[in-house]
Amino acid sequence: MRIDLNADLGESFGAWSMGQDAQLMPLISSANVACGFHAGDPGTMRKTVRLARAHGVAVGAHPGFPDLGGFGRREMKLTPQEIEDLVLYQIGALAAIARSEGVRLQHVKAHGALYNMACRDEAMAEAIAKAVLAFDPTLVLFGLPGSALLQAGLDAGLPVAAETFADRAYHADGSLAPRSEPGSVIHEVDMVVARAVRMVCEETVVASDGTSMRVEADTLCLHGDTPGAAVLAAAVRRGLEDAGVMVASLTRR
Amino acid sequence: MRIDLNADLGESFGAWSMGQDAQLMPLISSANVACGFHAGDPGTMRKTVRLARAHGVAVGAHPGFPDLGGFGRREMKLTPQEIEDLVLYQIGALAAIARSEGVRLQHVKAHGALYNMACRDEAMAEAIAKAVLAFDPTLVLFGLPGSALLQAGLDAGLPVAAETFADRAYHADGSLAPRSEPGSVIHEVDMVVARAVRMVCEETVVASDGTSMRVEADTLCLHGDTPGAAVLAAAVRRGLEDAGVMVASLTRR
Amino acid sequence: MRIDLNADLGESFGAWSMGQDAQLMPLISSANVACGFHAGDPGTMRKTVRLARAHGVAVGAHPGFPDLGGFGRREMKLTPQEIEDLVLYQIGALAAIARSEGVRLQHVKAHGALYNMACRDEAMAEAIAKAVLAFDPTLVLFGLPGSALLQAGLDAGLPVAAETFADRAYHADGSLAPRSEPGSVIHEVDMVVARAVRMVCEETVVASDGTSMRVEADTLCLHGDTPGAAVLAAAVRRGLEDAGVMVASLTRR
Amino acid sequence: MRIDLNADLGESFGAWSMGQDAQLMPLISSANVACGFHAGDPGTMRKTVRLARAHGVAVGAHPGFPDLGGFGRREMKLTPQEIEDLVLYQIGALAAIARSEGVRLQHVKAHGALYNMACRDEAMAEAIAKAVLAFDPTLVLFGLPGSALLQAGLDAGLPVAAETFADRAYHADGSLAPRSEPGSVIHEVDMVVARAVRMVCEETVVASDGTSMRVEADTLCLHGDTPGAAVLAAAVRRGLEDAGVMVASLTRR
């Protein structure tokens, strides 16, 4: 058994720091690097790519809405063409910086509101898939299992990776419980580890109504922006390895 | 005899239009496309690349300072590392959009204050050359003949193109007369055409003190942001062709 | 009979020009001045305030979403607190520049998607009214007649102005026909003039289904961003004056 | 004896935190609040004004260059008119938010590169003083003692405050030693406290060449962006109070 562990990194901007990149990088296999629209800047992108390379971590683009002030978490109503263009722009910008560091991109994961909207909205999902395909048809597109985003990737002939969250509650229909719902974010380290192991080894998760349901898991997201993020991430990785799971990026499968 | 004719295009931004791209594109052989930092946006970049492709015009990146409000014309004191990173970012962004349109970049021309400062400042010039080299060592770097920018390109082993301006006055030392100087911008169509022909056919120009001096000319810049820009550009092209000069992009040499 | 004629002005940004401010200013009584978030910049704001002052035109703030790239026309999901703060910020910025020109603000008109969303959404409408009230309770708040925005202004005790559009089709329920609907924008000068006169003199408009309906009209919006904008605006003003209507800003009532 | 203690606060932006505002606010008498151009955003501005009010701390505007990516620390070549307009814009924006919290501005302190350049450059200094005067002639303008900025304030008839830095080395000519110079920033708490007390009580400072020189001190700047900032600030305040100095904002003099 093997799993990819991914985290959103490189989310500093100019003089502002964010996240615990140095602590998380040794624990993950895939880094989603912000591309300057919701976070990140050319210098931060370079530093993040270098750090990933030093730890043998695969690099992916993490494009977001053009909304620095809202960190790409606020929904924006853009046309599919606008989305296709801004995703392509951001992938290209990161790929250029990565190339100058001798690194080739592995994947693309949309950020924040762009990710969430594209998981539900077919036209947005297709726009993202179209941009990825146009840039490099070997890039892996990340998305929630069963989402419009993942489906658009499959329809476009792209390799895709179903992404799960060990620290988030799921509804019985397979959707993520929204953050506004009590209990939607799980903080107990042991429970998160147990869920991670079960997701990867049994491909199941216990939904918020107590029923067990199947969940695809090609890559597991570790959050990096909470105070105990690195501690939690380390526990998840150790838990998975103790259960005999090999942590490896997707290109190494 | 042959010459490349270049112009700065794709300088619209969002709802704001600028320039006479549709009129200029049929007259030039190389388009310098703004990359979103001083002007341009992902959608404008795509439209401009398409228009260039439709007219068989070669596409180059036109990276600028991160200063939309100042159109990249205000000097900013950045470190060489910041400059290298933002040039690379912008080239990559345009290259991705161009790739999705089946177009490969031909060249890089820095914009506005970035161009002017890099023509004088070796560290800035090296930073730009380093970015271009890292992305693609076959890209042609534009710069004023005799400038630090052109020299940095040569030192990096990049193909370079010496750029001249038929509608600008030159000092006897080969430098451009600053725009603040009376007579620095030449508006008379016949005079601009005559200067263009002389620059290309004889590689000389009459300086502001009346002396004739040598000037290298691989590519000649046509301005697109003035009222009579398209008329002037058409006259220059016709004048060159009447003098037996072939207008062709650099890659076709 | 009297009416206020308003137009969105000062929508240039940096090197980019927009609108026909010089042609429109002599025709209107109230100018809605962009405040730097969707359009406008400090220098443009000053020039626009000066031009308004020279023509005896009242000045209002025209705050928008923080979305230069989308000209404030793309819906963004912000919290009411975020909206209150950004409206206050923009009003204050313009008021300071106006004060330095000896001008006091008359009104506030939200721009683009912010206006449209606040006309439907009570929480957004209240946030805008709260910001206006906090800054200056004598400022007139603009909104569609019958909208949540106008109601929020009334509830806050603000003076309000019902705004109508002579060049836009109305549905029988009083709502504006969306721009995507065929026939929603009326281009024939004579018809626009006739509608304007009827709106002001009879307070009625013929809806898209042919029925006549009542419409409140304190201020009539003249668009400035279309090619024939100034011609249309001049015709509307002349038509109103020929019908015995006096054009005057709201503070002069 | 009395002194004003000021610090740059409200420098968070969107999702990014910066500084130790909660720790510093109880220690200072004047807060310089970022206005959204180099740092800060409408929501952060409101929170910072509220925090200042809760601690009885006077609020001032801290306008900077339009350069979020460089935190306003990179020199930009703007015209005096551009500087006047952007300073006015930022003061107005903060004043509006402060007014909604029942707070009136006390002072204006330019930020980063804008401050440093205006201390040396008369035209920039005059532009800033002109903006402050136009907005409110009772606002106190901060500047280095002996600088062009302070002189421009005096010439404009504004109240001014000479600002000193207890943790920075001074040259014998009264200028601050640039940060690039070894020993230019003093980290030893005892030495900083001793210098602060001497600056306030004796109006002298020991320059880097060992000579003692006079230094005006109306307000003393405490830095908030270093790891030990709050500890150092607390020590300076205690040291001053132990020496019998009263810490009070300028308006309370």
Image (cartoon, coloured by chain):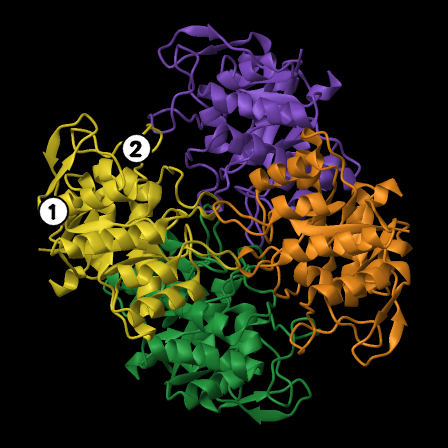
Chain colours: A purple, B orange, C yellow, D green
Q: Is residue D247 left or right of residue A126?
A: left
The foreground one among A169 and A100 is A100
Mark sitting on residue B135? none
Q: Amino acid at mark 1?
A: Asp
The answer to whether D157 is drawn above or below residue B184 in the figure is below
Percent of width and height locating residue B207: 82, 75
Quadrant hosting residue D55: bottom left
Quadrant hosting residue D3: bottom left
Using a 10 Å C-alpha cutoff, classify the residue at mark 1 as few (fewer than 14 neighbours), some (14 to 19) or many (20 or more): few
Percent of width and height locating residue A229: 53, 35
Q: Amino acid at mark 2?
A: Ser
Which SS class for mark 1? helix
Which SS class for mark 2? loop
Q: Chain of mark 1?
A: C
Quadrant hosting residue A26: top right
Residue at screen point 81% across, 44% down: B134
What whole-number distance in Å separates the C-alpha atoms at marks 2 and 1?
31 Å
Mark sitting on residue C155? 1
Q: Chain of mark 2?
A: C
